[in-house]
Image (cartoon, rainbow, N blue to C red):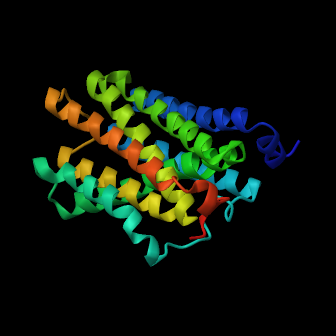
Amino acid sequence: MRLAGFTSLHPYRSSIGFLLIVVAVVISVGMINRLFLMGTLVQVALGDLILAITGIVLLTRLDWWEKAGYTTGFRLKHATLIVLPLAFALLSLGTGIRVTAPTAILAFAALTLIIGFAEETFFRGLILTTLLPTGAIRAVLLSSVLFAAPHLLNIIGGLWDPAFTIVDSIAAFGLGITFAAIRLRTGSIWPVIGIHAFFDFTSLISLGGITVTAQSLQSLITSACIGILFVAYGLFLLRNQGKGVHGGTDTS
């Protein structure tokens, strides 16, 4: 059976399969890093580069470039949809900027673009598109759960503080809903790739690296509240999904 036919007949199994690819790559690259001591930034870059290439291969085999929103550009009329996510991305800079060297800033920009493309290709490109025939709201919620789940892997090896990892997974679920809603409302995946990359970029230059140590209770509560806010915002964007969103394009 062709891959496109399998995803059509088995959307749930296919979405889990795509998730397992992500998990397998993350764990495999982590093991390679332990052997060769590449460093966490190189580990993340290599893992997401592999995911980006794998995603491109899968989209090509499925012939989903148009269906998943890669052939539709960003329209100015949709600019208001991304104001709130961009504003919250800037909040990461509230604690200051630890990375100021131009070469480091450029390296982080390149890294976050790779991350944004790779993760959005899998979660809003492949997984969301696979699940859409089950219903837009269900597809958004399930794809967001699958997006949040791999964030828990950051506990492995002590890369992130456990409490922060759990809260970040809640925030990722909320962001997943907002990203999926924007993807469906605009009919394009490019806005969410850009927003995703910007979120990661501001976080990296604020933290100065990938590793996250223990956070204050206030910071953890704030992050959880932001996640809940994005759940509400994403569902708000989808309020007319039965009227204005058909197959991923806002016709309003």
Q: Is residue 62 left or right of residue 103?
A: right
Residue drawn at (41%, 42%) of the image: 231
Looking at the image, which is closer to me, 89 or 140? 140
**Of 123 and 80, which appears nearest the observer?**
80
Q: Please state which of residues 39 and 184 is positioned toward the viewer in this rendering.
A: 184
Image x and y of residue 91, in percent: 20, 51
The C terminus, quarter of image:
bottom right
The reply to whether residue 37 is visible in this rendering is no
Horizontal side of residue 232 vs 122, given as left or right: left
For the view shown, which residue lies furthest in the bottom direction?
76
Q: Quadrant of residue 226?
A: top left
* Residue at the left extreme, as displayed: 96
Q: How many numbered marks does the figure carry?
A: 0
Q: Residue at x 67, y 45 (%)?
A: 135
Q: Is residue 104 above or below residue 176?
A: below
Residue 155 shows in this picture = yes
Q: Position of residue 153 (x, y in %)?
A: 43, 27
Residue ID at (57%, 31%): 24
Decide if residue 133 is on the left or right side of residue 2.
left
The x and y percentages for residue 162 are 30, 22
Please tell me whether residue 15 is drawn above or below residue 204 in the rendered image.
Answer: above
- Classify the position of the N terminus by image quarter: top right
* Residue at the extreme right of the image, as rendered: 1
Residue 76 at what x, y percent from top left?
A: 44, 77
Q: Could you tell me which residue is drawn at 21 percent across and 49 percent down?
A: 92
Q: Residue 9 sits in which quadrant?
A: top right
